[in-house]
Amino acid sequence: MATVLLRPAPSPPASPAPATAPAGRDTFVDAVRALGTVAVVTLHWLMADATWDGTSLHMGNALAHGAAWTITWVLQVLPLLFFAAGAAAGYHERRAAAAERGAEVTRAATVPSTGWARTLGRRVRGVGRPVAVLAVVWVVAVAGLLGAGVPAGAVRRMATTAPQPLWFLLVWLALVGVAPLLLRTWRRWRGRALAVAVALPLAVDLLRFGAGLHPLAWANVLLVWAVPFLAGLAYADERAAGRSSSPRPALLWAGLGLAVGSMALLVTLGPYPLSMVGMPGQAMSNLCPPTAPVVAQAVAQVCTILLARTAIERWARGAGRRPVAWLAGRSMTVYLWHLTAMFTVVGLDLLVLHERLPEPWGVDWWASRPLWFGAFALVLAVLVRVFGRFERSRSAVTGGAGHRLPAGAVLSDDGRCGPAAGGAATPR
């Protein structure tokens, strides 16, 4: 279902943002993270497809039928989540730099002077607790299911799929670890840095398929996601410095058109499958490791959200204010537990009620989606209520909104990074 899918020298001090720069959380980044979280959950819940014959559990993918691949072009939003993660890292780096400058000037800063290594350490410790809780719960669940007589094969299948979203955390930590280096590269080379970031994974694919260097493809696990991550860093750096954080609309429209056209051309003429996530029976996946079409998708999605930034911010401050605020403090929990919620409902239906899931993409399947999604959401709400406290503890560890900055510094986001999608799920 989900594809299986950290500290360089401190960056040069950045100029403090002008007093007129907006303080507090960056509503746009929060909204992008929230929309990405919803897309991740929706995509994975749409994938639910399993059969149980009394002895063995077969897990398929409902999106492997008909033209369902088109959904992955829209709901595979890992690029948006890495963009939000990059923006959060950019704000964190500027906050750390401001804290160090304040300590040097006043010798009594409210935030202790720490290098990026210590900042990264706090981030690792912050995500470690929610992940450890998930692991413990699943260890207990596996023992309980086996003790209840559920066949070992079915238990193994669920237990190995539920933690697959954790791959995102590893890539995220790697990119956060080199964020100061990426930020220095952006500040020196500007748009050329983004152009090189896009070109590198394309070159890897060219060598992979043109020269037969297939093991090299795994470099794209970092290189592809570095594209939206660097775009997020650039956005945060420009905004915190009081400059325009978006390119000219004409450039964004051109980038969007070129990216979507490239996606269509690559899957039509190249060796790439139509789906942007891995599907059963496919010879290869566009997401494991990520490929050139995903690079194009990343460019398209970043251009789209920057073009829609004003509308997104207006929505996040109006009708979307409550869901965005709710997810801002719970996206890690939702990300970690949404597959568990789905497995719980599907498992009860197959193993306890002895029912069969509707045939994917049929009339009954579409008609039953609200009922199934409602059941998934109900179980997820309970899980978030129970385990969300560990994410709130994480916020305190990683320096949340209550973390004070030296005078003159601007904090536009609390630095947490948000959940993923695609063939996999995501964090914050």
Image (cartoon, rainbow, N blue to C red):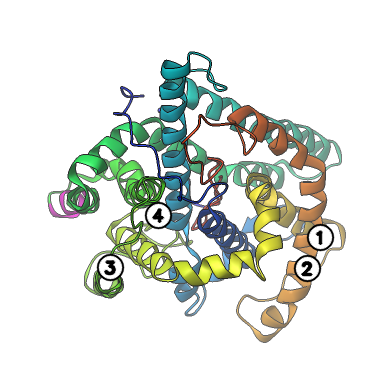
Name the residue: 28% across, 68% down. 248
Label 3 sits on residue: 248
Kind of residue sitting beneath label 2: Gly
| First of labels 3, 2 by sequence position | 3
Q: Secondary structure at mark 4?
A: loop
Label 2 sits on residue: 374
The circle on residue 287 is: 4
Q: Quadrant of residue 50?
A: bottom right
Question: Between tags 4 and 1, which lies in front?
Answer: 1
Q: Is residue 5 above or below residue 305?
A: above
Name the residue: 44% across, 62% down. 281
Q: Tell me the CA gap for discs 4 and 1.
A: 30 Å
Q: Tell me the CA gap for discs 2 and 1.
A: 6 Å
Kind of residue sitting beneath label 3: Arg
Q: Quadrant of residue 262?
A: bottom left
- Label 2, residues with CA under 10 Å away: few <14, some 14-19, many ≥20: few
Q: Secondary structure at mark 1?
A: helix
Question: Between tags 1 and 3, which lies in front?
Answer: 3
Residue, far left:
211
Instruction: Give residue 96's position: percent from left, percent from top.
Output: 45, 28
